[in-house]
C-alpha cells in the first residue's frame, strides 16, 4: 500500500477479506468492512450480532461492532484519512461505495485489487496444499465419469450436473461453484448451463465442474476447476483427430508454463498447436485464469498479458474448440508455476474416454 500510495484498504464482501482474516462478509445491506490502514492496526467493522461468527485474532485486527441504529459508514469514515487514497474491494456493493464517497468527498478511490491481486496471485505452500486437495477431489469425480460410474445416456444434463454437485460436496468442498454439463451440440457453447436435454448415445459430453474447499473456521476455502470430455460411443474420426490436437495443445501449454514466461506465450503455445489442425478459429476464449480463494483471479493467460509467470502462480490451462451447432471439447487442469517447471495439480486421464453407460 505504501508503494502504491494507498492510505487504507476497505474490504467487504468478496474474496480479499476471507483471504486476509478467514472471515467472509454477509452479502447484505448491513455493512461489514475491514479497514486496513497502510500503518497501524486493521479494524473489522460489522453488525454486532455477526461478531460471534468472527474467529477473533487480536494480533491481526480489532473488532468494532455496530448496533442497528448506528451508522456504519460513519464508523468507517472515522477510521481513515477522509482526504486520502482509499482502495475499495471490487466486490463491494455500490451503495456502500457511494455512501462513503458522499461522506468523504475529498477522498480518492482506487480498486483494492491493485494491492491484493499482486499478493493473492503468489500462493504459499499451505495455499498450494489446499489447491491440491481441491484438485484431488474433482480428479476422483472425473475418474468416475471416465469409468462409466456416473450414468450419462438417457439422463438429462441437469441430472448429471446434480450428480456431480453432490460428489463435489462429498469430496471436501463446502460449496459447489459450478457443474457445467454440455452434451452433443451444446458442447459448442463454452459456458453452457446444464439443461433438460437428454444425453444420447454417440455424442460428446463436456463436464466442467468445481467448488470451494471446506476449511477450519478462520481459514479461507480454495477452488477447484476441472474439465474433461467423454464420448458416449465410438467417436467419429473427425472428432477423434480434433481431440488429439486439443490434447497436444493442452500438454504443450502446460509445458510452456515455466517461471518467467510471459502469460501470453502460454496462450500462444496452445493456439499455435490448434492452428496446425485448423482448429484455432474455434478456440474462442483465453487459455486460462488464475485460481485461489476466487475461481477466476490473476494471472490471466491471454494475448496482451506480457507479465511473466512467477513462482507460486496457480492457474488453469484450458484450451478448447467449439464448432457451432455441431460439437465442442475442452481439457482443463489447474497448474502451479514452480522453479522446477509447471506442476499440474490435476492428474486424472486427459484422453477422451469412451463411456457407454
Ligand atoms: Zn470458464
Ligand atoms: Zn472450468
Ligand atoms: Zn477454468
Image (cartoon, rainbow, N blue to C red):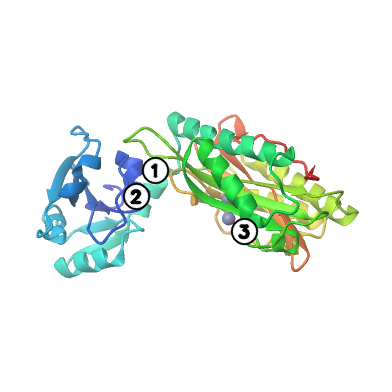
Which numbered tag is attached to residue 202?
none
Whether residue 153 sits left or right of residue 226 in the image: it is right
Whether residue 300 sits left or right of residue 4 in the image: it is right
Furthest residue toward right: 237
The residue pinned by badge 1 equals 119
Q: Position of residue 235 (x, y in %)?
A: 85, 51
- The residues tagged by marks 1 and 3 sit, at their Cα atoms, a distance apart of 35 Å
Residue 357 falls in which quadrant of the image? top right
The residue pinned by badge 2 equals 115
- Answer yes or no: disc 3 within 8 Å of ligand 2: no
- Answer yes or no: disc 1 within 8 Å of ligand 3: no
CB contact under 8 Å: marks 1 and 2: yes
Q: Is residue 73 above or below residue 254?
A: below
Q: Position of residue 252 (x, y in %)?
A: 72, 43
- The residues tagged by marks 3 and 2 sit, at their Cα atoms, a distance apart of 37 Å
Kindly tell me whether residue 93 is visible in this rendering.
Answer: yes
Amino acid at each position: 500500500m505504501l508503494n502504491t500510495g494507498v492510505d487504507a484498504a476497505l474490504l467487504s464482501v468478496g474474496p480479499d477479506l476471507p483471504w486476509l482474516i478467514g472471515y467472509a462478509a454477509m452479502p447484505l445491506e448491513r455493512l461489514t468492512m475491514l479497514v486496513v490502514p497502510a500503518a497501524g492496526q486493521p479494524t473489522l467493522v460489522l453488525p454486532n450480532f455477526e461478531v460471534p461468527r468472527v474467529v477473533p485474532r487480536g494480533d491481526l485486527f480489532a473488532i468494532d461492532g455496530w448496533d442497528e441504529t448506528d451508522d456504519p459508514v460513519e464508523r468507517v469514515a472515522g477510521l481513515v484519512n477522509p482526504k486520502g487514497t482509499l482502495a475499495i474491494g471490487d466486490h463491494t456493493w455500490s451503495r456502500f461505495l457511494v455512501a462513503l464517497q458522499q461522506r468523504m468527498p475529498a477522498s480518492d478511490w482506487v480498486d483494492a485489487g491493485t494491492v491484493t491481486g499482486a499478493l493473492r496471485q503468489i500462493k504459499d505452500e499451505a495455499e498450494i496444499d489446499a489447491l491440491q486437495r481441491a484438485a484431488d477431489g474433482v480428479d476422483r469425480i472425473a475418474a468416475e465419469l471416465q469409468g462409466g460410474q456416473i450414468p450419462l445416456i438417457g439422463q438429462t444434463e441437469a441430472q448429471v450436473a446434480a450428480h456431480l454437485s453432490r460428489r463435489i460436496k462429498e469430496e471436501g468442498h463446502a460449496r459447489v461453484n459450478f457443474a457445467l454439463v454440455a452434451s452433443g451440440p451444446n458442447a459448442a457453447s463454452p459456458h453452457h448451463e446444464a439443461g433438460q436435454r437428454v444425453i444420447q448415445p454417440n455424442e460428446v459430453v463436456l463436464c466442467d465442474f468445481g467448488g470451494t474447499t471446506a476449511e477450519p473456521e478462520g481459514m479461507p476455502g480454495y477452488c477447484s476447476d476441472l474439465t474433461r470430455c467423454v464420448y458416449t460411443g465410438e467417436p467419429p474420426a473427425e472428432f477423434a483427430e480434433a481431440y488429439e490436437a486439443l490434447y497436444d495443445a493442452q500438454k504443450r501449454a502446460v509445458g510452456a508454463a515455466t517461471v518467467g514466461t510471459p502469460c501470453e506465450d502460454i496462450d500462444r503455445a496452445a493456439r499455435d498447436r490448434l492452428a496446425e489442425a485448423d482448429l484455432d478459429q474455434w478456440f474462442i476464449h483465453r487459455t486460462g485464469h488464475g485460481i485461489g480463494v476466487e475461481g477466476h483471479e490473476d494471472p490471466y493467460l491471454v494475448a496482451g498479458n506480457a507479465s511473466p509467470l512467477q513462482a507460486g502462480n496457480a492457474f488453469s490451462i484450458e484450451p478448447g474448440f467449439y464448432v457451432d451447432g455441431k460439437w465442442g471439447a475442452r481439457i482443463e487442469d489447474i497448474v502451479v508455476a514452480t522453479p522446477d517447471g509447471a506442476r499440474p495439480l490435476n492428474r486424472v486421464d486427459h484422453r477422451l474416454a469412451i463411456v457407454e453407460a
